[in-house]
Image (tube, rainbow, N blue to C red):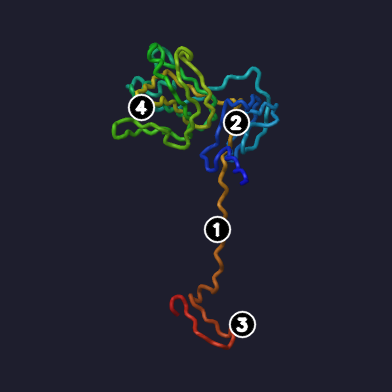
């Protein structure tokens, strides 16, 4: 029988950035560090083996230790800016959802009945992300269910979604860059989720985007908070750096010194006999 094909790599060669996974059953709570070939260092969990090994694929691991007791709350990552796909009016701009406050009637608000509206949050620099908390709109019981089906994306570049429209005027906001990664998705119901809920969103990036996929959607929440990863239940998969191209071979030395011209006739050359004939040069000489 033919030999089995090798398994696909855990991370493909030429990928844009290292990949951070979270909340998988085989990543433990003992935490260490993983240095990838890119030079970045990440906090990762062990394999439930008391730091016998770390969830560090393609990198160098060290410094494992048991978790803190009690575990410290993860720090909130400050946002330096935000952009909405559209704005209902100037009172409900994107910055309302990153100002650290979520009182009654305070919110950001896209245009009503949009196609896949989104809110993109800028963390100012690439960060190791662990969870995201969404504070839903207050003061309007029917408005809370606008959240409905939601997605969270992590990217290292802005503009995860396009803003063009097709010939029918429908906004097309699908993923437009391979550097964006879906880190979480779900369906909000007020009965089970309440006003606020937190979801795992393990990833590495500068931009976090909340997106409501589908037609006739309205993004209308009070606040979105992004929290750093603590390394528990986390795996780092280092991107494979392409090997450097081999140097080009040196050109062969010229057969004759260039100052002698393109054609050279040698007289009394050793190894040349006494019989004669004709020879033609490429240029006709």
Residue 172 percent location from the top left of the image: 36, 32
Q: Judging from the image, what secondary structure is the residue with disc 4 in? A: loop
Residue wearing tag 3: 271
Give the quarter of the figure containing the C terminus.
bottom left
Q: Residue furthest bottom?
A: 274
Residue wearing tag 2: 235
Q: Residues within 10 Å of mark 4 (few under 14, many from 20)?
A: many
- Mark nearer the N terminus (3 vs 4): 4
Q: Residue furthest front?
A: 1
Residue wearing tag 1: 248
**Image-quadrant location for residue 209:** top left
- Mark nearer the N terminus (4 vs 1): 4
What is the distance, in whole Å, between disc 1 and disc 2 at their CAs? 39 Å
98 left or right of 12?
left
What residue lies at 60% left-to-right and 38% top-to-bottom?
Answer: 36
Residue 101 visible in rendering: no
Tags 3 and 2 touching, CB below 8 Å: no
252 left or right of 218?
right
Q: Nearer the viewer, mark 1 or mark 2?
A: 2
């Amino acid at each position: 029988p033919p030999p089995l094909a090798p398994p696909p790599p855990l991370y493909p060669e030429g990928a844009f950035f290292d990949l951070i996974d979270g909340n998988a059953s085989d990543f433990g709570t003992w935490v260490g560090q993983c240095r990838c070939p890119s030079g970045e260092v990440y906090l990762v969990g062990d394999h439930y083996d008391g730091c016998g090994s770390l969830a560090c694929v393609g990198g160098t691991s060290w410094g494992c230790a048991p978790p803190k007791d009690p575990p410290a709350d993860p720090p909130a990552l400050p946002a330096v800016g935000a952009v909405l796909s559209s704005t209902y009016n100037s009172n409900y701009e994107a910055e309302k959802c990153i100002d650290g406050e979520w009182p009654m009637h305070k919110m950001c608000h896209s245009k009503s009945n949009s196609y896949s509206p989104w809110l993109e949050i800028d963390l100012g620099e690439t960060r190791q992300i662990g969870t995201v908390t969404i504070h839903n709109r207050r003061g309007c019981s029917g408005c809370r269910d606008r959240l409905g089906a939601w997605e969270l994306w992590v990217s290292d570049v802005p503009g995860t979604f396009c803003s063009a429209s097709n010939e029918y005027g429908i906004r097309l906001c699908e993923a437009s860059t391979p550097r964006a990664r879906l880190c979480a998705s779900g369906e909000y119901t007020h009965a089970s989720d309440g006003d606020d809920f937190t979801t795992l969103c393990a990833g590495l990036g500068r931009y976090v985007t909340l997106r409501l996929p589908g037609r006739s959607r309205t993004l209308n929440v009070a606040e979105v908070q992004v929290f750093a990863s603590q390394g528990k239940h986390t795996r780092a998969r280092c991107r494979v750096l392409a090997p450097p191209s081999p140097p080009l071979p040196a050109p062969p030395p010229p057969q004759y010194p260039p100052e002698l011209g393109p054609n050279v006739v040698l007289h009394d050359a050793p190894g040349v006999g006494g019989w004669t004939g004709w020879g033609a040069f490429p240029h006709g000489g």
